Amino acid sequence: MADRKEEGLSALGGKTVYSKAYTPEVLEAFTNLNRDLDYWVKFNCPEFTALCPITGQPDFAEIVISYIPDVKMVESKSLKLYLHSFRNHGSFHEDCVNTILKDLRKLMDPKYIEVTGLFVPRGGISIHPYANWGRPLTKFEALAAQRFAAHQ
């Protein structure tokens, strides 16, 4: 853990303080020690909540994030704090998924990333938005197109 502290990580090992507002600034990254390899990292957050921006009612979802890292990787506790920051934030389901993808791209610049939101039904309809991105002009751009086309 001392090595990670040298990378400027503050959430890891510290007291957990939850934000009451959307806070992308809590996201932290560390150096990928296996940059020579392509491999998947997958996070599953089964207790994600955000607020409907119209009614203020809570929306519940399972958020699944999968990515292929390059130089940087997201630190998991900071990701937990970040996802928790949506709890009192008014945002449509599709916006939540795309915001998460954009914020993680900005933080890490991964080779490939995808985010899926499995939102619990409201009014008898469930919404499962999916967004992905692959680095342009690489095999990961082709992977993004392939996975997007095959997504159900």
Image (tube, helix red, strand yellow):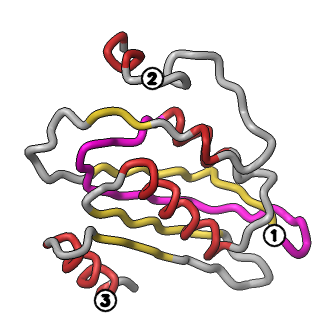
Marks 2, 3: nearer the viewer: 2
Under circle 1, the secondary element is loop
The residues bearing labels 1 and 3 have C-alpha atoms spaced at a distance of 29 Å
- Choose mark 1 or mark 2, whichever is in front: 2
**Splitting the image into 4 quarters, where does residue 117 fall?**
bottom right
152 vs 141, nearest the viewer: 141
Looking at this view, name the residue that lies furthest to the top. Answer: 2
Furthest residue to the left?
A: 36
In the rendered image, residue 110, in percent from the top left (x then y), is placed at 31, 55
Task: Count neighbours of disc 2 (C-alpha within 10 A) and say few if under 14, some if 14 to 19, many if 20 or more.
Answer: few
State which tag comes first along the sequence, 1 or 2: 2
**Residue at 48% across, 63% down:** 101
Q: Position of residue 29 (x, y in %)?
A: 41, 37
Please indicate whether residue 38 sits to the left or right of residue 7 in the image.
Answer: left
Give above or below for 77 relative to 138.
above
Q: Counting residues from the N terminus, which is met first, the one under dot 2 or under dot 3?
A: 2
Residue depicted at 58% across the width and 64% down the height: 99
Q: Disc number at residue 8? A: 2
Question: Which residue in the protein does label 3 denote?
Answer: 149
First in sequence: mark 1 or mark 3?
A: 1
- Could you tell me residue 64's position as x and y percent? 46, 59
Q: Amino acid at mark 2?
A: Gly
Q: Secondary structure at mark 3?
A: helix
Q: Quadrant of the N terminus?
A: top left
According to the image, label 1 marks what residue? 52
Q: On screen, 5 above or below 70?
A: above
Count of labels shown? 3
Residue segment shown in magenta = 53-76
Which image quarter holds the C terminus? bottom left
- The residue carrying pointer 3 sits among few (fewer than 14), some (14 to 19) or many (20 or more) residues within 10 Å by Cα, namely few
Q: The disc labelled 3 sits on which kind of residue? A: Ala
| 42 is higher (above) or lower (below) than 125 | above
